[in-house]
Every structure is written in C-alpha cells, then in structure tokens.
C-alpha cells in the first residue's frame, strides 16, 4: 500500500526491521541555540543562576536525553550509544548559548536522533534552569549538521 519505511502494507505505523543490516560505525552531529536577555546571559556566564551551574547541568541532561531517545520517539530503535559529547558555547552576540552534540555508535541504524535529542534536552534544561529570571527565552535552530556511515553514506549540511 505504501512505500514509506515506517508504514506496513496495510497502512499501519511500524518500526523498520533493521535485522538484516550489517553493523557499521556511525556518527551524527547536531546543534541548536537558546536566546536570552543580556541580563540572563550575564547570570549564566557568571554562574549566578539560583538553581546552580546551568551549563554543567544542561550538559549532563543532554547526555541522558541521548541515551533515552528510543523511549521518547516512538519508532526509534533503542541503540547502544558508544559516545556522546556535548559542547556548550556562550555567545554574547545572540545573546545565549549554542549547544552542539556528537553521537557515535557501531550498529545497524544511525544516531541522528540521539544527537538531535541531546541538543534538545540540553536546551530545554537551560530554559528550566534560568526561567525564574527570563521566561521569554527562545529555543531554536535545532538541526542535524553532519552524519557519517550507514547505507545512505555521509552527509554534511551546506
């Protein structure tokens, strides 16, 4: 009935069968940003947010989010993430924080969703940590910027 990968012949949603795919090394990088008022940026930069160290907590949250991707995205396969790295960079010109995540695995499916989830959870955590002083923060620009490995090969955002 359909040629969509996540729809069975009768039109029902399904998880893609990856059992015949050989495991290969895979990597994905994603990024996103949170914009905030200059006063909020200064508080985050100077580690003066009442809830604690915003950037450290957000980094740990991003790692945890990557590891739980399959629990949150219904048709994602649970995969063994072999590495997840997060870089949080203060950017006064936003003002705000850029988050970049790199996820790696050796498996039969990619880690794009894990990288995107790491960025998303990290950004949401920054919002949660600083919302007491700035409810108007904006999360956005979340995107995959690179993937390596797998049947479809390598891809880089241009």
Image: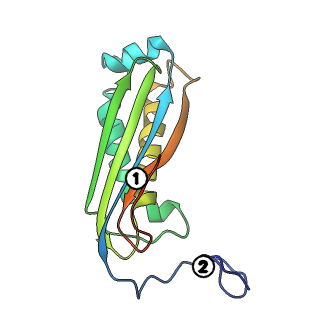
Q: Is residue 79 left or right of residue 72?
A: left
SS for callout 2: loop
Q: Residue at x 47, y 64 (%)?
A: 71
Rendered-image quadrant of the N terminus = bottom right
Furthest residue toward left: 82
First in sequence: mark 1 or mark 2?
2
Corner quadrant of residue 56: top left
The residue beneath circle 2 is: 14
Residue position for label 1: 146
Residue under the image location 46 percent in, 39 percent down? 32
Between 11 and 50, the one lying in front of the other is 11
Count of marks, rendered view: 2
Percent coordinates x, y for residue 105 in the rendering: 29, 66
From mark 1 to mark 2, how far is it between C-alphas?
26 Å
Residue name at image x 60 percent, y 79 percent: 14
Which colouring convention does the figure follow? rainbow
User: In this rendering, does residue 44 appear at all?
Assistant: yes
Left or right, 10 with reference to 143 = right
Residue 150 lies, in percent from the top left, at: 38, 71
Residues packed near mark 2 inside 10 Å, few (<14), some (14 to 19) or many (20 plus): few
Which disc, if any, is residue 21?
none
**Identity of the residue furthest to the front in this view:** 158
Residue displayed at 44% across by 82% down: 18
- Residue 49 seen in the current view: no
| Residue most extreme to the top | 39
């Amino acid at each position: 009935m359909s040629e969509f990968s996540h729809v069975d012949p009768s039109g029902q949603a399904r998880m893609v069968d990856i059992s015949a795919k050989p495991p290969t090394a895979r990597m994905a990088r994603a990024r996103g940003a949170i914009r905030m008022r200059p006063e909020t940026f200064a508080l985050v930069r100077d580690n003066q947010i009442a809830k604690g160290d915003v950037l450290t907590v957000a980094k740990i949250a991003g790692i945890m989010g990557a590891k739980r991707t399959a629990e949150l995205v219904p048709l994602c396969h649970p995969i063994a993430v072999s590495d997840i790295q997060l870089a949080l960079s203060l950017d006064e010109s936003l003002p705000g924080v850029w988050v970049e995540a790199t996820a790696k695995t050796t498996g039969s499916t990619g880690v794009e969703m894990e990288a995107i989830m790491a960025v998303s959870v990290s950004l949401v955590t920054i919002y949660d940590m600083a919302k007491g002083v700035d409810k108007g923060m904006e999360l956005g620009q979340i995107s995959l910027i690179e993937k390596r490995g797998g049947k479809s090969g390598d891809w880089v955002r241009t």
